[in-house]
Image: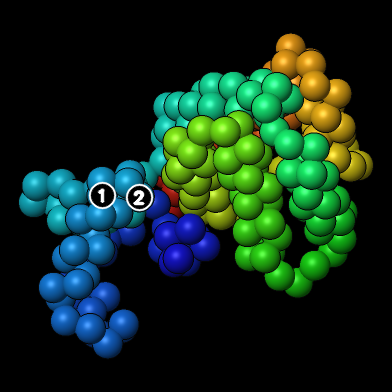
Amino acid sequence: DDILAGRLKPGERLVRKAIGMRLGVSTIPVIEALYMLEIDGYVENRALAGCRVRTLTMQDIDDDLMLREALECQAARLCAEKAPQEALDRLMKRAAQVDRFISADTPDPTLGSQLHWEFHIELGRLSGHAVFGELLKKVWFQRYMSLNSLKAIRFEPIPEGWHQILVRKIKKRDPELAERAMREHVQYGRKDDRDALAVYLKENAAKR
């Protein structure tokens, strides 16, 4: 949670004893948790340097976006072909929630993040293949880890009703249209992510 919320920054050392004391546990569950987080790509363990939050690079941003695009575009195609109408109706309600949250000045960005990734993961599950939901969960966790670390810099405003527009196109039951709509959805703001990382890397270089 601390990594995803940006309270632990990329490159920050993770000292087992200090974490155990803060959480009120022994070092054994901390070691196990760090091992699991390393497998999932949230932390990295380097010889002589110890464990730390995974650093961010341009390649990381590009790789995560490319993987998300591949997964979500295929999921959108399958949703258009297979998802029951009532499931798509529920997805539209989720989309409206996300769009309202994005357009509002809310004091709880954590809730907005949760609503957002739950929408995309649910879309993956509606493809009829559970693997899409599981893989998208990991991709979206990594995305929010990155965005929170970068202070979620966004230079281009999201269009009004952005997620509802996507669902409407999926509900037309045209796989080609659904894929194109999802590709446009995923690629929107990609330049912002790269620009935000460039700002982050420049700021960190200046601190050294």
In x, y percent, where is residue 138? 45, 44
Task: Please name the residue shown 25% across and 63% down the image.
Answer: 33
Query: Which amino acid is tagged 2?
Result: Tyr
Q: Point out which mark residue 42 bears.
A: 2
In x, y percent, where is residue 151? 60, 54
Q: Specify whether 171 is left or right of 147.
A: right
Q: Are marks 1 and 2 in contact (CB under 8 Å)?
A: yes
Coloring basis for residues: rainbow
Please determine whether, in this image, residue 163 is positioned above or below residue 79.
Answer: below
Distance between the alpha carbons at the discs numbered 1 and 2: 6 Å
Q: Nearer the viewer, residue 105 or 39?
A: 39
In x, y percent, where is residue 23? 31, 82
Name the image quarter holding residue 123: top right
Q: Nearer the viewer, residue 96 or 127?
A: 127
Q: Is residue 48 visible?
A: yes
Task: Please name the residue shown 75% across and 72% down the image.
Answer: 107
Please name the residue that numbered disc 1 is placed on: 38
Name the image quarter holding residue 128: top right
Please determine whether, in this image, residue 3 is positioned above or below residue 139.
Answer: below
Instruction: Say what secondary structure mark 2 lies in.
Output: loop
Q: Point out which mark residue 54 bears.
A: none
Residue farthest top in this picture: 176
Q: Is residue 11 visible?
A: no
